[in-house]
Image: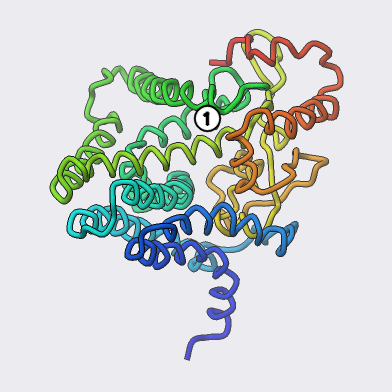
């Protein structure tokens, strides 16, 4: 008989396991084709937006004294996700290569659904895993990122974003009034460069060249090459094209989230190349319950920047007195970001309110709007 305490812990963790429902749903729509394929975006973006309206906000905080053992059922979903995602990606490539009931457009829509799984869930879980000290978890993070051809995100996120968030040196801090369609190509270019330079500079401090085998970029390239070759072996050139397409969809969703998380929020410039320390006020937060289940509390983003290695069940909620709040969860806000006039109408007044609330002494925001100050080094 399962102990009552174990059952209670599993019961509390179960909402964060809702992502597993995407896998049988994906298998179903793959066999049906047609308009059924639209269920994949509807089941994430729209379903959880509706659920947010019914479930409301979660303003409670977990006990920070909770032990690793007590978090087992929360951690388990992130630990088992890579093999599941692997089967979805390469199973789908095999499936479209051995069946003829899906036309080209349907195959593209199917792999759009794959990208939703590997982006909304996979990259998000890799983000959780990369912040942990456990070697297995870091490897799982690398495997998840390689499966969407975005391995350098680990270096960029850990070495650049967390250090330079809210400054010009952080590519993924969206500038005030910068639309997503300008942000996205800029980030694709700058993130890879900043990640590579961060690893190169770390090696230089050890008197090692960039091409030393300890540079994680060798691992990144090797893992990505393995996945590309596997896609080629299973599905030929069309299999590689579909694999790359799902990776692009996943990356697009990641950068949409990055865009929302810090839009228009800048750290106060202190002069001499220095900025204030990162504070809860430098991230947008959302306490919407259902979308936090889907995104394993990613929307409690201020606390993540305060304690980057804090596991997702323990992330703390902040009120508007300490951190700015989004009007809706990420599922709605990322969709709004695709329409810059709508996004600016909703968010620019909130950025201006944020400035008045936290930095009333700053009267000229022009340098911050264009991020002209040099970032601290």
Left or right: residue 73 compared with residue 55: left
Front in this rendered view, residue 371 or 134: 371
Q: In the image, is residue 22 above or below residue 360?
A: below
Classify residue 182 by image quadrant.
top right
Query: What's the residue at 40%, 47% (across, down)?
Result: 112
Residue 152: x percent and y percent? Answer: 37, 32
Examine the rendering and report whether any part of residue 133 can be seen. Answer: no
Kindly give the residue lying farthest to the bottom in the view shown.
1
Residue 98: x percent and y percent? Answer: 17, 58
Label 1: element kind: helix
Query: What's the residue at 55%, 57% (across, down)?
Result: 294
Residue 136: x percent and y percent? Answer: 34, 53
Classify residue 149 by image quadrant.
top left
Query: What's the residue at 60%, 53% (across, down)?
Result: 297
Query: What's the residue at 53%, 15% (across, down)?
Result: 377
Examine the rendering and report whether any part of residue 349 can be seen. Answer: yes
According to the picture, the residue beneath numbered tag 1 turns out to be 161
Left or right: residue 21 compared with residue 292: left
Front in this rendered view, residue 28 or 69: 28
Q: How many marks?
A: 1
Classify residue 327 by image quadrant.
top right
Label 1 environment density (alpha carbons within 10 Å; few <14, some 14–19, many ≥20) = many
Coloration mode: rainbow
Q: In the image, is residue 191 above or below residue 319?
A: above
Front in this rendered view, residue 33 or 51: 33
Residue 272: x percent and y percent? Answer: 65, 8
Front in this rendered view, residue 153 or 33: 33
Left or right: residue 134 compared with residue 331: left
């Amino acid at each position: 008989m399962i102990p009552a305490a174990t059952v209670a812990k599993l019961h509390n963790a179960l909402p964060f396991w809702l992502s597993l429902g995407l896998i049988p749903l994906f298998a179903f729509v793959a066999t049906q084709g047609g308009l059924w394929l639209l269920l994949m975006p509807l089941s994430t973006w729209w379903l959880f937006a509706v659920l947010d309206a019914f479930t409301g906000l979660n303003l409670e905080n977990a006990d920070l004294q909770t032990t690793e053992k007590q978090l087992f059922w929360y951690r388990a979903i992130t630990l088992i996700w890579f093999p599941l995602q692997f089967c979805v990606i390469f199973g789908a490539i095999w499936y479209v290569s051995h069946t003829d009931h899906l036309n080209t457009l349907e195959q593209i829509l199917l792999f759009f659904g794959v990208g939703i799984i590997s982006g909304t869930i996979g990259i998000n879980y890799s983000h959780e895993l990369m912040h942990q000290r456990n070697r297995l978890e870091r490897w799982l993070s690398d495997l998840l990122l390689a499966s969407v051809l975005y391995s350098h995100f680990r270096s960029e996120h850990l070495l650049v974003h967390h250090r330079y968030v809210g400054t010009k040196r952080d590519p993924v801090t969206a500038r005030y009034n910068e639309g997503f369609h300008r942000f996205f190509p800029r980030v694709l270019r700058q993130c890879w460069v900043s990640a590579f330079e961060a690893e190169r500079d770390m090696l230089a401090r050890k008197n090692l060249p960039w091409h030393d085998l300890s540079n994680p970029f060798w691992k990144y390239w090797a893992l990505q090459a393995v996945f590309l070759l596997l896609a080629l072996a299973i599905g030929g050139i069309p299999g590689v094209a579909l694999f790359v397409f799902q990776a692009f969809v996943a990356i697009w969703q990641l950068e949409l989230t990055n865009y929302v998380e810090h839009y228009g929020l800048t750290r106060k410039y202190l002069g001499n190349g220095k900025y204030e320390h990162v504070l809860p006020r430098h991230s947008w937060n959302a306490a919407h319950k259902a979308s936090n289940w889907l995104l394993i509390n990613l929307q409690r983003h201020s606390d993540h920047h305060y304690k980057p290695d804090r596991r997702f069940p323990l992330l703390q909620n902040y009120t508007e007195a300490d951190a700015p709040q989004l009007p809706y969860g990420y599922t709605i806000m990322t969709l709004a970001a695709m329409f810059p006039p709508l996004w600016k109408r909703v968010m620019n007044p909130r950025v201006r309110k944020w400035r008045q609330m936290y930095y009333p002494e700053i009267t000229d925001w022009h340098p911050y709007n264009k991020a002209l100050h040099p970032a601290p080094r």
